[in-house]
């Protein structure tokens, strides 16, 4: 699992670079022909990880319900994310890596409820969910690289 966490931490650093490099207006811009923006993708990977790892393990998520509702699968950005929300997302981006790693090392994850993703991946174990999370975050990083060409 060491490699899984290391890859995830690197991925989150790349997301952090977007938050540090783009203005609030740029983060909120939904380019023509696209269905989301930079900040939605970042918020989405945070809430997805919490669902995949914590909720599917029968544990409470460590994010506000309002954040989950705004960035969960199937949601769409409104282009009105505030600086306060961006700051919250920025904090959660790194905190959730450390929290998850600490919980994993402490043996907090005792069970896992198998899950079939909408894209057809069967996640039968926590390890599979964590590895899928890295794959999922890579997809959204690619989307963000496409978006940045238009803002």
Image (cartoon, rainbow, N blue to C red):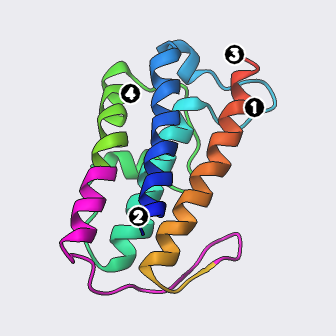
Indicate the secondary structure of the residue bearing disc 1: helix
Q: What is the x, y in percent for residue 116?
A: 60, 80
The CA distance from mark 4 to mark 1 is 20 Å
Indicate the secondary structure of the residue bearing disc 4: helix
Viewer-side label of 4, 2: 2
Residue 146: which numbered mark, if any? 1
Q: Which residues are magenta?
A: 97-121
Mark 1 crowd level (few <14, some 14–19, many ≥20, 10 Å Cα): some
- Tell me which label, 4 or 1, sits earlier in the chain: 4
- Tell me which label, 3 or 2, sits earlier in the chain: 2
Q: What is the x, y in percent for residue 118?
A: 66, 71
The CA distance from mark 1 to mark 2 is 30 Å
- Tell me which label, 3 or 1, sits earlier in the chain: 1
Q: How many marks?
A: 4
Using the image, determine if residue 85 lies above or below residue 114.
Answer: above
Q: Quadrant of the C terminus?
A: top right
């Amino acid at each position: 699992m060491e490699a899984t966490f290391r890859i995830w931490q690197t991925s989150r650093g790349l997301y952090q670079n977007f938050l540090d490099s783009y203005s609030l207006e740029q983060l909120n811009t939904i380019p023509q022909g696209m269905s989301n923006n930079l900040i939605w993708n970042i918020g989405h990977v945070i809430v997805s990880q919490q669902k995949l790892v914590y909720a599917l393990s029968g544990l409470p998520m460590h994010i506000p319900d309002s954040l989950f509702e705004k960035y969960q699968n199937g949601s769409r950005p409104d282009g009105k994310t505030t600086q306060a929300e961006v700051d919250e997302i920025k904090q959660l981006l790194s905190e959730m890596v450390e929290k998850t790693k600490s919980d994993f090392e402490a043996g907090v994850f005792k069970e896992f409820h198998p899950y079939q993703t909408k894209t057809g991946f069967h996640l039968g174990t926590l390890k599979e969910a964590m590895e899928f999370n890295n794959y999922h975050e890579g997809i959204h990083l690619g989307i963000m690289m496409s978006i940045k060409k238009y803002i």
